[in-house]
Amino acid sequence: MTINTEDLLNSILQSLDRIGYIKAEDIPDIDLYMDQVTTFMGERLKSTLRNEEEDKILTKTMINNYAKNDLLPPPVKKKYTKNHVLLLIFIYYYKGVLSISDIQALLGPLTDKYFDKKSEPNLESIYETLFSLETEQVEVLKQDVEEKFKIAEETFQDTGDESDEMMKLFTFISMLSFDVYVKKLLIEKLIDGYTKKAKPEESKPDKKTEKKSDKKQG
C-alpha cells in the first residue's frame, strides 16, 4: 500500500475548509411536518455523511425516539417549529460524541429556559453564537492537524518500505483518536459536574420534627 502523504494532508485540510453549518436564517420560519424536517436536514447536512448512499442524517424513528427521551418537545398539531429544527441540529452533532443521557442533561435546561422565549437571548441567537464560534476554530483545528501529521511523518522511518507508510498513517489516526478520547472525557466530566450542581439538595428533616416523630413512635 503506497500512500501519498502530501495528497492525504491536502485532502484533509480541504475537507476542513468545507465544514459548514446550517444558518438559522436558512431554516424555514413556517412550521414543518416531519417529512419536511427530515428532507431539510438531509439536504443541508448530507456533506457530513461518511456514506451518502447508506447513512441517514435524520429519520422519523430518530425524531420519535428523541421525543420519547425528552430531547425534543412534542410537535404542535404534528408540526415542528424552527426551534425544533435548531435542537435537532444540536442533537445531530452531539450524538457522535455523547450518550443520549448526556445530551439530555446538556440540552434539557437550555430547552426549558429558551425554547419558547421570544426576547434575546433566545434559542436562535444562542445557536448562531455557538456555531459562529465553531467556524472561527477551523483555522486552529487545521494547524493542530498539520502538527500531528508532521509528527506522524517523522515516525517509523527505519526500513524504508511500504510498512513505514502504513505505520505513519496508523500513528496519525491514533493521535487524532487520543485527542477525541481526552476531549470526550473532559466533556463527560463537565456534564457530570453540571448535573450535580443543577440538582437541588435533598431537604434535611427538621430536628424538632424528628423529636416529635420519635415521641409518637415511642
Image: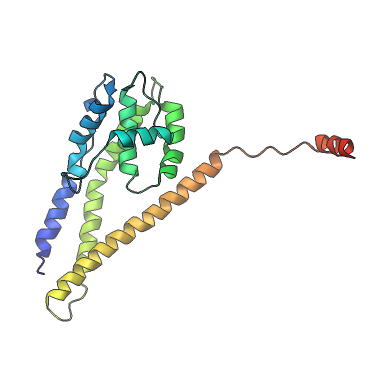
> Which quadrant holds the C terminus?
top right
Which corner quadrant of the image does residue 36 belong to?
top left
Where residue 152 sits, quadrant-wise, is bottom left
x%, y% of residue 205? 75, 37
Q: Quadrant of residue 150?
A: bottom left
Towards the viewer: 100 or 195: 100
Q: Does 32 sit above or below residue 203? A: above
As drawn, the residue found furthest toward the bottom would be 159
Q: Does residue 129 appear anywhere in the picture?
A: no
Residue in the image at 23% along x and 67% along y: 170
Q: Position of residue 174 (x, y in %)?
A: 28, 64
Q: Nearer the viewer, residue 19 or 29?
A: 29
Residue appearing at x 45%, y 27% in the figure: 113
Q: Is residue 107 above or below residue 181?
A: above
Inspect this view and state whether residue 204 appears. Answer: yes
Q: In this picture, is 60 found above or below 97? A: above
Q: Looking at this view, is 68 or 179 the one in front?
A: 68
Total numbered badges shown on the rendered structure: 0
User: For this view, does 37 lie left or right of residue 8?
Assistant: right
Q: Indicate the position of residue 39 as horizontal and vertical percent values.
A: 21, 31
Q: What residue sits 30% from the left and 24% below the top? A: 82
